[in-house]
Structure formats: C-alpha cells, structure tokens
C-alpha cells in the first residue's frame, strides 16, 4: 500500500480504506485455508531445495505464510495493516518480536521466534532488498490485482527488483467482465501481464481456473471470474 496510490476514483484503494476494511472485518479476499494454486505448483518452484527466501506482497494474514514456513522455508510478507499482522500471529499462536524497520519511518518488522516468518508493516514501495534480501520465490495472490491501475508499472519495477536472477514469480491473476464489477480486485488478463512484465521476463501461462463469482460482490452481470496462473522468470 502506498500513499501515492490513492487515485481520484472512488473504487481506488487508499491506506484509509485498507485500514477500515480490516477494522470492519470486510476481508472477503482472505482465504480460510492454504491457497490451492500454491499447493499445486509450489513443489515445482522449490525443486527439492530447502531454506528458500519466499516473498508474499500485500500478504494480509494469509495462511500461506505459515504453510511455507512449515515446509522449511523463510516466509516474508509486506502488509500495511498492523491489525492484519497481529491477527496472523495471534490466530496461529506464534510468538514474535517487533522492531523498527531500518530507513522506513513508522515501519515495523514482526519476526516469529524461530525467525522463519517476517512480516513488514510499511508502505510496500519503501520495502527494499536491504530489509530481507532478494527472493528465490514470489507468490502473488491478490496483490497485483488489488493495486490501483496507475501504480502497476511502479509495482512491477519493485517486484522485479526483489527477485533473484534465477528466481521464480508465481502469479495468480484474474480475468472477468470489468463492466460488471469495478474493482478492486481489477482484471489483469494474460495479455496485460505480458505488457507489464514481457520486456524483462518470460511469461509462461500455466492454467486457467473458473471461480464462481458471488453476485453481491461482483454484480449480477458477472457469473464467473477466471483465475489465470502465470509463471514469471527473468529472460
């Protein structure tokens, strides 16, 4: 989340809206189980390696964080909501410590007692490799599709700056009828992903999955939305 991403459209996401969503419990995007797409593809990304540095941008209180750490890797997330971060540790009964982030005013890093999970509470665009190194794997579910469209190029620059040269970026994107639902989330079909990442990255389409839409959330015109799973690696 970034102060510069407020935009001038009512449906654009701002820091205030994000904080309010967590305070009001308006977090329908949060899954109550580990993401099935991550479970399906993670072993291929890991390729038998251990102790990998895995990044989850705009992570909320995702169960994926703990699952990744339980597989023997280091899970690193960035999240603007302090409530989301504290809820994650509380709900999983994980002991943690908190310290100020170096070079980030009002930024805080929350670290599990075993050091396997680090959650950074800050403006996403102020997070750099200085804070947690570069990443072997990135898992982007609900992040790229949530940011304001005007910030996409900036977001891509940030994410690619954090990925190791031989790293893998697994993206769960969405495609649906934008006329029926004014995001976030916003639809980012494969062709848009290619336009954003194609200069620097190989863009490999892995699969598409139907997701039944909830009328109250996505509008009566949208009966289905589609998850497009894409693997990004540097050229």
Image: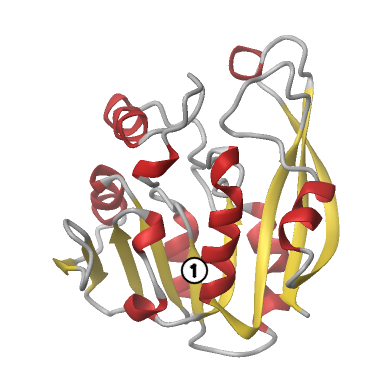
User: Where's residue 62, x and y in %?
Assistant: 45, 52
Does the image show residue 119?
Answer: yes
Observer-nearest of 30 and 175: 175
Q: Is residue 162 above or below residue 139?
A: below
Q: Is residue 130 above or below residue 190?
A: below
Q: Residue at x 21, y 59 (%)?
A: 107
> Which of the 4 quarters of the picture holds residue 48?
bottom right
User: Where's residue 71, x and y in %?
Assistant: 51, 76
Does the image show residue 98?
Answer: no
Q: Is residue 87 above or below residue 132?
A: above
Observer-nearest of 126 and 34: 126
Residue on which the image places disc 1: 55
Q: Secondary structure at mark 1?
A: strand
Q: Residue at x 25, y 63 (%)?
A: 94
Observer-nearest of 153 and 56: 153
Q: Residue at x 48, y 40 (%)?
A: 30
User: Where's residue 131, x and y in %?
Assistant: 32, 76
User: Where's residue 174, x and y in %?
Assistant: 72, 41
Left or right: where 41 falls relative to 105 = right
- Residue furthest out toward the top: 220
**For the residue carrying disc 1, how many other residues have a C-alpha within 10 Å: few (<14), some (14-19), or many (20+)?**
many
Left or right: where 19 falls relative to 206 = left
> Which of the 4 quarters of the picture holds residue 4?
top left
Q: In which quadrant will I find the C terminus?
A: bottom right
- Residue furthest out toward the bottom: 49
């Amino acid at each position: 989340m970034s102060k510069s991403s407020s935009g001038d459209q009512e449906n654009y996401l701002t820091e205030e809206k994000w904080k309010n969503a967590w305070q009001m419990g308006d977090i329908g995007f949060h899954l109550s189980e580990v993401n099935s797409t991550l479970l399906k593809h993670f072993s291929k990304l890991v390729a038998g390696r251990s102790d990998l540095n895995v990044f989850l941008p705009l992570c909320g209180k995702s169960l994926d964080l703990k699952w990744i750490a339980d597989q023997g890797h280091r899970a690193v997330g960035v999240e603007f909501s302090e409530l989301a971060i504290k809820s994650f540790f509380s709900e999983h009964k994980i002991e943690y410590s908190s310290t100020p982030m170096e070079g980030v005013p009002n930024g805080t890093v929350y670290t599990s007692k075993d050091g396997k999970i680090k959650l950074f509470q800050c403006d996403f665009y102020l997070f750099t490799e200085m804070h947690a190194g570069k990443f072997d794997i990135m898992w982007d579910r609900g992040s790229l599709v949530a940011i304001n469209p005007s910030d996409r190029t900036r977001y891509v620059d940030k994410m690619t700056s954090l990925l190791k040269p031989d790293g893998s970026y697994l993206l769960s994107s969405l495609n649906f009828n934008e006329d029926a639902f004014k995001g976030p989330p916003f639809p980012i079909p494969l062709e848009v992903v290619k336009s954003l990442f194609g200069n620097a990255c190989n863009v490999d389409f892995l699969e598409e999955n139907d997701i039944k839409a909830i009328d109250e959330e996505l509008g009566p015109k949208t009966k289905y939305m589609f998850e497009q799973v894409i693997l990004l690696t540097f050229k």
